[in-house]
Image (spheres, rainbow, N blue to C red):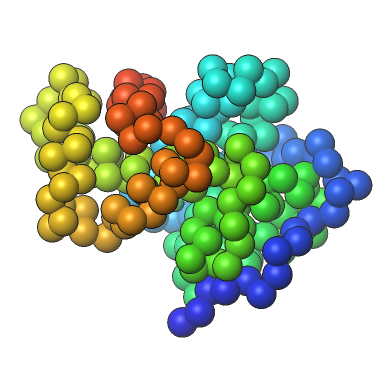
């Protein structure tokens, strides 16, 4: 099954700045994503994107929501239409005339699958958070205290264990850090305390 999108231009530049309202995005999220585990993953990535936009990119509320929205919807079609991932959500957002930056970020969150390179900061961070966030969450589920007391060392140990969360691509994680120019340790330390605050 090829998920290659066959194009690298998404949305229309005239739609720059057009975002879904939070209610609209949540409605789409709840309608399309029925799997509770996938919902948690998408909400966690959304929160990390928002935190990064606020703390590192110093964006205003609209800018933060733009990043958060990309995280919240990046896997929206994976649950019900895996063979159409992520062309279905891309087409939906194009029809709704949404900011092309969001659509490009979604299209490039798995460049080996979709054939679209992460270009700007939002693309790169969505790609960087996606897999690592999943591994850290899987780790929290096997710890008696969840996120309590979780540290860098423990996460790195799990990363080295190929059998742990085996579906998480270690290669993608390292590639994403290189592309975003962020040391792996820094990314892990950013994720742990913030992801711990997402109520699931
Ligand atoms: Fe994802």
**Residue 51 image offset from top left, x and y in percent:** 51, 24
194 is higher (above) or lower (below) than 22: above
* Residue 120 visible here: yes
- The residue shown at (36%, 47%) is 174
Q: Residue furthest bottom?
A: 1
What residue sits 29% from the left and 53% below the top?
170
Instruction: Please give the name of the residue rendered at 13% of the width and 39% of the height, measured from the top-left corner.
Output: 157
Could you tell me which quadrant the C terminus lies in? top left
Q: Nearer the viewer, residue 145 or 130?
A: 130
Asked if residue 80 can be seen in this view, the reply is no
Relative placement, left or right, of 29 versus 167 is: right
Is 42 in front, or is 109? 109
**Is 115 located above or below residue 190 in the figure?**
below
Q: Is residue 92 above or below residue 53?
A: below
Query: How many numbered circles are shown?
Result: 0
Q: Position of residue 76 (x, y in %)?
A: 54, 55
Q: Nearer the viewer, residue 24 or 166?
A: 166
In the rendered image, the vertical position of residue 79 relative to residue 127, given as above or below: below
Which of the 4 image quarters holds residue 92?
Answer: bottom right
Image side of residue 104 versus residue 2, left or right: right
Identify the residue shown where x is 20% and y is 35%. 155
**121 left or right, relative to 198:** right
Spot occupied by residue 86 in the image (x, y as percentages of width and height): 57, 64
In this picture, residue 149 sits left or right of residue 114: left
Residue 188 location in percent, x, y?
Answer: 32, 31
Which residue is most to the right?
A: 14
């Amino acid at each position: 099954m090829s998920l290659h999108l066959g194009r690298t231009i998404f949305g229309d530049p005239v739609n720059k700045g057009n975002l879904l309202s939070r209610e609209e995005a949540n409605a789409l999220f709840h309608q399309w994503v029925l799997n509770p585990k996938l919902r948690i993953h998408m909400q966690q990535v959304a929160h990390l994107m928002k935190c990064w936009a606020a703390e590192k990119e110093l964006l205003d509320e609209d800018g933060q929501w733009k990043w958060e929205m990309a995280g919240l919807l990046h896997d929206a079609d994976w649950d019900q239409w895996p063979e159409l991932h992520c062309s279905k959500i891309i087409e939906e957002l194009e029809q709704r005339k949404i900011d092309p930056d969001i659509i490009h970020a979604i299209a490039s969150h798995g460049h080996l699958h979709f054939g679209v390179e992460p270009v700007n900061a939002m693309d790169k961070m969505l790609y960087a958070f996606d897999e690592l966030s999943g591994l850290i969450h899987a780790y929290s589920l096997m710890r008696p205290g969840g996120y309590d007391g979780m540290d860098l060392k423990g996460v790195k140990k799990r990363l080295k264990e190929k059998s742990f969360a085996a579906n998480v691509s270690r290669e993608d994680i390292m590639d994403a850090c290189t592309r975003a120019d962020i040391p792996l340790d820094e990314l892990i330390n950013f994720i742990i305390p913030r992801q711990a605050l997402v109520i699931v």
